[in-house]
Image: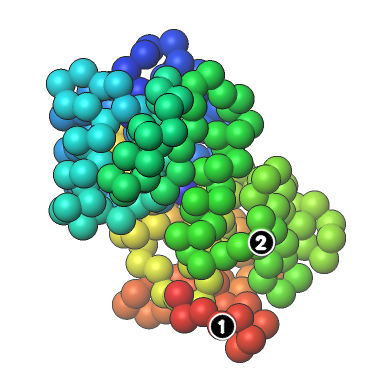
Amino acid sequence: MRILLVEDEPTLAAQLQAALGAAGYAVDRADNGQDAWFLGGTEPYDAIVLDLGLPVLDGLSVLRRWRAEGVGAPVLILTARDRWEEKVTGIDAGADDYLTKPFHVEELLARLRALIRRASGLADPVLRCGPLALDTRTAQLTLEEAPVNLTAQELRLLSYLMHHRGRAVSRGELTEHLYAQDFERESNTIEVFVARLRRKIPAQLIETVRGLGYRLSCPDDAGHGRSG
């Protein structure tokens, strides 16, 4: 999962980037509204953390531009403004959630997880696929209730497939959502991680869809109620 973090205060931005990275996200950063507007409009993010008090272009203007341009990524606003009228303005501008400074990083992470789940049509924080269960709160995968150790890249890949289970996901889409903008992306990286995952979980769960990419095919998909 890939996050855009928009925060102009260097210390807080570094702390949040570290926390998001430790939670398994690929993170791009912007410290002003102009760069944020460009990145949010040209890169595919699973969620955006947006400070309102930004230089060059304020956060509300950025958000309104995104929504007017059709950017649909869920947006969590961060702000020092705690008046309810300002919260209403933020939500009406297109924000999905609102967090007032100061805040606990754990709460930010929990709200982000919820936003990403809802964007995929999911409610339960534990994502399931046959014998697999991925707890998004702890980033712990179990296979028939036994823990499975995954690298950060394997976790991101499986998490994205589980959030979009039943849908064929292209290699390009996976690459765009698993790596930050400045990451050196090699052409065969996705294939390598899929091969590693298949050695750790039932291999048949990850189908290769010829000409398209990969699909997580779960034994209980017939009753899942989602087409992707």
Front residue of 166 and 197: 166
Q: Alpha carbon of mark 1 to alpha carbon of mark 2: how far?
A: 14 Å
Q: Residue at x 57, y 78 (%)?
A: 217
Q: Residue at x 66, y 61 (%)?
A: 124
Measured as percent of width and height from the top left, residue 67 is found at: 23, 51
Residue position marked by numbered label 1 in the rendering: 225
Measured as percent of width and height from the top left, residue 207 is found at: 52, 76
Q: Residue furthest bottom?
A: 222
Residue position marked by numbered label 2 in the rendering: 124
Helix, strand or loop status at disc 2:
loop
Measured as percent of width and height from the top left, residue 178 is found at: 42, 48
Q: Residue at x 32, y 77 (%)?
A: 211
Asked if 80 appears above or below 61 in the picture, the reply is above
Front residue of 120 and 107: 107
Q: Amino acid at mark 2?
A: Asp
Q: Quadrant of residue 106?
A: top right
Residue 121 in the figure: left or right of residue 35: right
